[in-house]
Image (cartoon, helix red, strand yellow):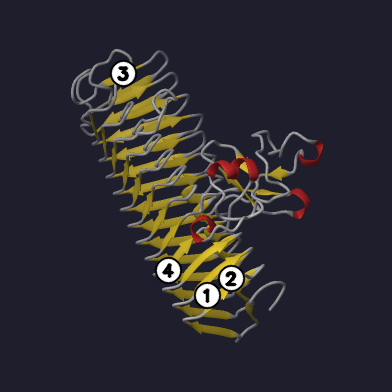
Amino acid sequence: MDNGGCSQAKGKGCRITADSCTVEGCSVAALASANDASVRLSDCTLSGGAGHGLCVRDNGSCSASRCTLSGFGVACAGVLTGGALELSGCTLRGRANASSQEGNGSGNGSGAAGAVEGGGGGGGVVVEGKGSSAVVKGCSLGGYTGWAALAVAAGGTCTAEDCQMTGSLQGAQVGWVLCRYGGCNHRVQVLSTHTPCCPQAFCGRAVTQAKPYSCCPTTRFLNTLQVGPRGGRLHAARCSLADNAGEGLAVGEGATAELRECSLTGNGAAGARVGGVGSTAVLRSCGAKANGGDGVRVEAGGWANLDSCEVHGNGAGAGAGAAGEGCGLAVAGAGARATVIGSGFEGNRRSGVRVEESGAVVMKKCRTAGNGERGGVVGGVGVEVGPRGQADLSGACDVGEEGGAGGGVVVSDHGCLKRSS
């Protein structure tokens, strides 16, 4: 027992091994590992705490297999500076799915709207700090309606294979800002509304996008939020990021996400969103389908690389078309760039690909078909170049004829299109 923790291994050579155990109701961490110590769990159940389920830091390590972690206020598994975590075949659930316990602004399951107004919500697996790493294989993460199922920040690296990240505010979030009020240091949630919000009770109010980030309009909270460390890296293979309230994948603050053979489907906002200087999303052989917003959205300063991807049927959300969303790929904002190779854009509510507002896209050997209507263009638009947008199509891109089944190309005033064989 240490500061509300149930069990802690601390110091070189210290070890905790647990099999088929149950731990619940801890205020800081159910199990913690630090200073070269190790924790090894199998078939255990950890639940119902205000802090972490597992907390690993300072060269500590933890491995867990076939375990269930649920209902923790900060994160089911937190990896801090220098920690190493490995999860295999585990189930992680947010507080909303675990119990009816009220979170006082710090629980996992207050719902997306509550997260904006009341700041509720921890995460599933959270990796942050220099040298922190996590390997997550064959796990199911869901029910984090106040935050992301998987989150990675500056200095952290996470590898996820054959995992499901569903039913949360976001499937995976890479990069964030930190709250600095009163030594809070908690993560500020970058929601699909682009309104960061600190999850803590005393800071839990919607904040403005003023720079530095400022929290609520009262004197007490002004200028209390600052941009935190930049970076973070996620590698994911054969994962499903589906049916989340916001994005399946959100990348910002100079972070990088690399996805291979992953599915981004049925999310309330974009399948994947990337923005901010140095932020990168690489999607290889992935599918972004039936999302409420755009299939893939690239905002100012972000870069996306799509290779052999299928982006179909996006813009299913109510009002998506009216809001200008629902494209297969949307690239907009200064420095927003996308490179697309051998990918298909079909059946999206708006254009297959839209680029505008100083954004730029390069497409090679791509195809578009059956995308939604734009104005009086019958049969839809394959590639739409808006004001100040730039598009470069090469390698026999098949976008059909304007108004035809292939979708065609529309270039607005002050748009730039380059086509080559």
Placement of 58 over or under 403, stated as above or below: below
Q: What distance separates the C-alpha of mark 3 from that of mark 1?
A: 54 Å
* Residue found farthest to the front: 100
Q: Position of residue 348 (x, y in %)?
A: 30, 31
Q: State which quarter of the image contains the N terminus.
A: bottom right
Q: Residue at x 43, y 51 (%)?
A: 167
Q: Name the amino acid type tagged 2.
A: Val
Marks 3,4: beta carbons within 8 A? no
What's the CA distance linking mark 2 and mark 1? Answer: 7 Å
Horizontal side of residue 408 vs 413, given as left or right = left
Q: Which mark is residue 62?
A: 1
What amino acid is labelled 4 in the image?
Answer: Cys
- Residue 56's label in the rendered image is 2
Task: For mark 3, give the secondary structure.
Answer: strand
Q: Which mark is residue 410?
A: 3
Is tag 3's residue or tag 1's residue first in the polypeptide sequence? 1
Q: Nearer the viewer, residue 118 or 376?
A: 118
Q: Are marks 2 and 1 in contact (CB under 8 Å)?
A: yes
Confirm or deny contact between disc 4 and disc 2 (CB under 8 A): no
Question: Which quadrant, please, contains the C terminus?
Answer: top left
Alpha-carbon span between mark 4 and mark 1: 13 Å
Discs 3/4, front: 4
Element under label 1?
strand
Amino acid residing under circle 3 = Val
User: Which one is earlier in the sequence, the residue at label 4 or at label 1?
Assistant: 1
Going from the N terminus, do you reach mark 3 or mark 2 first?
Answer: 2
Q: Residue 149 location, x and y as percent?
A: 48, 55
- Specify which label sits upstream in the sequence, 4 or 2: 2
Dot 2 crowding, Cα within 10 Å, few <14, some 14–19, many 20+: many
Query: What residue do we see at 66% from left, 34% from top?
Result: 208
